[in-house]
Image (cartoon, rainbow, N blue to C red):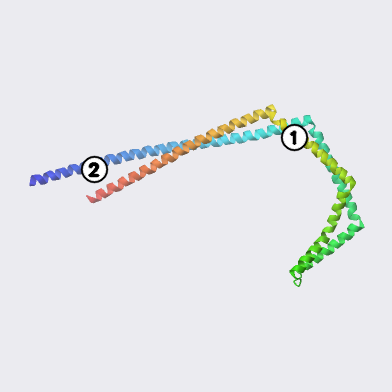
Amino acid sequence: MQHFTLAMFLLAFCWVGGTTAVAAQATTKTKQDLDAAQKKLTDVTHDVTKAEAEFHKAEAAHQAAVAKVQKARQSAAVAVGAKLGMPAAVAQRDAASRTLDAAQKALSKEIRAQADYQAAAKEADQASAKLGEARDDTKLSDEKRKELTAELSKTIRKPTELERERLEADGNLKQLRIALAEAGKQVAAIQTEVMKVVDDQPEVKTAMQAERDDAEKVKKAREELDKHKKEQAAAQKTVTADTQKAQAQAQAKKKTKNGK
């Protein structure tokens, strides 16, 4: 009986010892896995940082290329426009605009000095005062106030409408407006011709090709950044899993120790 008890004790001791050894090996393996995962995460995070810098660099270069295209187009448009007579057309349009503006101001001054305009302006001032009184008059019904407001507002607008009608009807101003419109059409026609050929100019073609090349670099930099971010997410997931595994083993070891 004593031999049997001793044998059982030795067997139990060997089993516990073996279990402890296996557990220790598992813990060591888990720690090694966690260390490797953390190193992987550090490495891929560095790759992400580097890829982000490259992406921003590519974006900045592309934006600069876009600006160069715009500048090249503007320069080419000026050069082509000069050959097609744009400066003279613009000068003619601006002169026509100044002539019309001066004529309108002169006629407006004459109109405002006329007796009927003066009378209308006086009535408008009186109507404006009455409108203020009507808005403050609490004895008026809403319907009456609305009716009075419409009537007085019409009187207030009369001088402006009178001036506008006479400006529109004046024969000289009509001719000047036609001249301005024709000058504007000439400028627009030249602009259309310029836009047809501006992208065919050598300096514009060169700038546009550089912009396309930089756009492709941005695309590749974005793809590279996305790839490293996916690797970072996977590495983070592995670190999280290995950390949880290590914590679980530590808890199990603690329970085993407390149970002895």
Q: Tell me: 27 left or right of 5.
A: right
Name the residue: 75% across, 32% down. Answer: 193
Mark seen at residue 131: none
- Relative to residue 227, is residue 76 drawn left or right? right
Residue 242, located in which quarter of the rendered image?
Answer: top left
**Residue at x-position 85% and y-position 40%:** 179
Q: Nearer the viewer, mark 2 or mark 1?
A: 1
Whether pointer 2 and pointer 1 mark residues with C-beta atoms closer than 8 Å, the reply is no
**Dot 1: few (<14), some (14–19), or many (≥20) neighbours within 10 Å?**
few
Under tag 1, what secondary structure?
A: helix
Horizontal and vertical percent position of residue 113 = 91, 55
Q: Which residue is mark 1?
A: 192
Q: Given the current orientation, which residue lies at the most extreme left position?
A: 1
Q: Is residue 77 above or below residue 101?
A: above
Residue 177 on image: x %, y %: 84, 44
Q: Earlier in the sequence, mark 2 or mark 1?
A: 2
Expressed as whole percent of the image width and height from the top left, the position of residue 131 reads: 79, 65
Q: Quadrant of residue 122?
A: bottom right
Q: What residue does disc 2 label?
A: 20
- Up the image or down, 142 lies above or below 74; here it is below
